[in-house]
Amino acid sequence: MLDSFKVVKGGWVLDPFCGSGTTLLASKEKGINSVGVDVMPLCIFISQVKTMDYNIEKLKEVSRSIFAKKFVAPDTRILSPLIKRAFTKYAQEDILFYRNVVREIDDPIIRNFFTLALIITSEKVSFAYKDGAVIKIRKVKNILPFKPMLKRTIKKMINDLKRFGPKAAQVKVYQGDARNLSFLEDSTFDAVITSPPYLNIIDYMKVYKIENELFFNGSTGQSIHSYIGLSVKEKSDFFTNLKAPPIAKVYFKDMESALQEQYRVLKKGGWIAMVVGEGVFPDRIVPVHNILAKSAQDVGFQVKKIMYVNKRTVTDQNRNKIGTALESVLIFRK
Ligand SMILES: C[S@@+](CC[C@H](N)C(=O)[O-])C[C@H]1O[C@@H](n2cnc3c(N)ncnc32)[C@H](O)[C@@H]1O
């Protein structure tokens, strides 16, 4: 995308729903500056850690000192029932022990690097997995022990950094709301490359409950749904002609605000590439790409292309077919 939009070294790219920072990292790799915005603190944390510059020798030295620490079994009674179900007793002890070791690292940049390693490793040794909107627990027999898994994760993260090498590009990550980017100036960006929340009811705070409890002091902030904002209970007097559930109308209203902000911060001639999926409801499929393309036009964009990249058959709870849901990339130009 960066190539086809002809964004060159020193240019600026925005991802207003940056998640774990894929766009930011891809931009940095090409020497392109980027700004990422997300509502969720965990996403901000991951994006920042992934795009930071590190002293690799220092990371190796700290890694050695972490594994040289003598293990002392911590008290696991402080953990919630969910965490206890999600990990073996050994993993619970290891996670708490290494979490305490990492918390003692003075340099915040290095501490955050190893905290991300702990988050990734915890997910690998967990019985819990994310199934759309919920966390499910499945008992797996051959789950690997935490410590060697942590070693492997850190090694891989350091190798990735080595391979990536230092890059002369700025990356700025903000916790914020894509519907109000007032902290960004008008006409600044060459391109927006993003994947907004899909039209469904995933509550990201619930889905990341384990990570939040273990590594962010249970801090959650406001619950953030996948559809991006307004209360669904609010009476909706927008998209009145659209045959869709209220939650979908709210989603499109939110996306329109986000598109207006993207229009404002893009330079004239700037591009948007947006990956979207259709909204699946028990009785229908809502064609998100068409409705967003119409909104983009209303906001002032030219709709350049709608590329279908994926399709899947969706069924209801009784396995009756609802229809085929498409995933697409929308290309707009200011
Ligand atoms: C589909 S994910 C993005 C995935 C991302 N492309 C990646 O590579 O990880 C959508 C993201 O939008 C964020 N989000 C939801 N509502 C938002 C809002 N109002 N403003 C900014 N970000 C929001 C969610 O926290 C989530 O990280």
Image: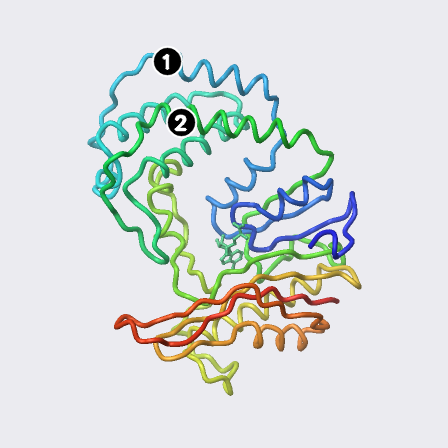
Neighbor class of circle 2 (other Cα within 10 Å; few <14, some 14-19, many 20+) is: many
Q: Decide if ligand 1 comes within 8 Å of the CB at mark 2.
A: no
Q: Name the quadrant of the C terminus.
A: bottom right
Query: Residue 315, located in which quarter of the rendered image?
Result: bottom left
74 to the left or right of 113: left
Residue at image point 69% right, 67% down: 332
Per the rendering, the mark at residue 150 is 2
Q: Which residue is mark 1?
A: 69
Q: Where residue 183 appears, x then y in whole percent?
A: 65, 53
Q: Which quadrant of the view contains residue 283?
A: bottom left
Amino acid at the residue labelled 2 = Leu
Q: Position of residue 23 (x, y in %)?
A: 61, 48
Which residue reaches farthest bottom?
241
Q: In front here: 269 or 148? A: 148
SS under mark 1: loop
Which quarter of the rendering shows the N terminus?
bottom right
Q: As rendered, which of 146 and 256 lies closer to the eye? A: 146
Rendered view: 253 above or below 148: below
- Residue 192, compared with residue 120, is above or below; it is below
**Of the residues tagged 1 and 2, which is closer to the observer?**
2
User: In the rendered view, does 58 fall on the left or right side of 247?
Assistant: right
- Give the image location of residue 236, x and y in percent: 46, 79
Check the image and tell me how it is coloured: rainbow
- Is the C-beta of the residue carrying label 1 under 8 Å from the nearest atom of ligand 1? no
Q: Is residue 298 left or right of residue 325?
A: right
